[in-house]
Image (tube, rainbow, N blue to C red):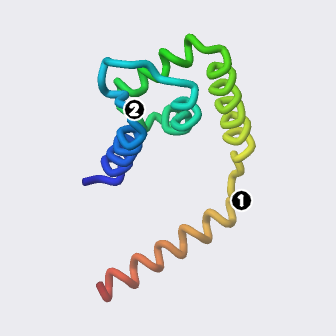
Amino acid sequence: MSGEDRLQRGVEDSFRNRGVELDSAAGECSCRDITDYLFEYLDHQLSAVQSERLQAHISGCSRCTERAEAETHVRDILRASCREVAPATLRVRIAQQISIYRRTTRDFG
């Protein structure tokens, strides 16, 4: 089982343990469900059915819409501020070290 599959199974188990069956057609999501699973939703770690159920709630709830938009905005700011590019000299030194490592491990591996 891949790491992604284990993560998906963990999220589904967590939903079930709280009595939330987002894969079923019955019932609606609550604001608490959005609070508990917003990060997984925004990270696209939920099944299509789970995502649709959360999206339906977010679309109809102004408070959850604001929460989701605020988190998306924070993520956009962080993503934009973390666009540091390593200096060319550092990239060259790292590439050289990787090349040396590959040659030495190939000879002894």
Query: Which quadrant of the figure contains the C terminus?
Result: bottom left
Tell which circle, 1 or 2, labels the residue nearer the N-terminal end: 2
Q: Which amino acid type is marked by label 1?
A: Pro
Residue in the foreground of this view, choosing between 32 and 75: 32
How many discs mark residues in the rendered view? 2
Q: Position of residue 88 (x, y in %)?
A: 68, 59
- Residue at the spot x=42%, y=39% of the render? 18
Residue in the foreground of this view, choosing between 69 and 60: 60
Q: Which residue, given by chain and number where applicable, does mark 2 sit on?
A: 20
Q: Which residue, given by chain and number where applicable, does mark 1 sit on?
A: 87
Residue at the front extreme? 19
> In the figure, 105 relative to 67: above or below?
below
> In the figure, 47 relative to 102: above or below?
above
Mark 1 surroundings: few (<14), some (14-19) or many (≥20) residues within 10 A: few
Location of residue 45 (image quadrant): top left
Q: Position of residue 57 (x, y in %)?
A: 51, 17
Residue at the left extreme? 1
Q: Position of residue 107 (x, y in %)?
A: 32, 86
> In the figure, 70 relative to 65: above or below?
below
* Horizontal side of residue 66 vs 61, given as left or right: right
Label 2, secondary structure: give it.
Answer: loop
Mark 2 surroundings: few (<14), some (14-19) or many (≥20) residues within 10 A: some
Q: Position of residue 2 (x, y in %)?
A: 29, 53
Residue at the top extreme? 60
Query: Which quadrant of the figure contains the N terminus?
Result: bottom left
Label 1, secondary structure: give it.
Answer: loop
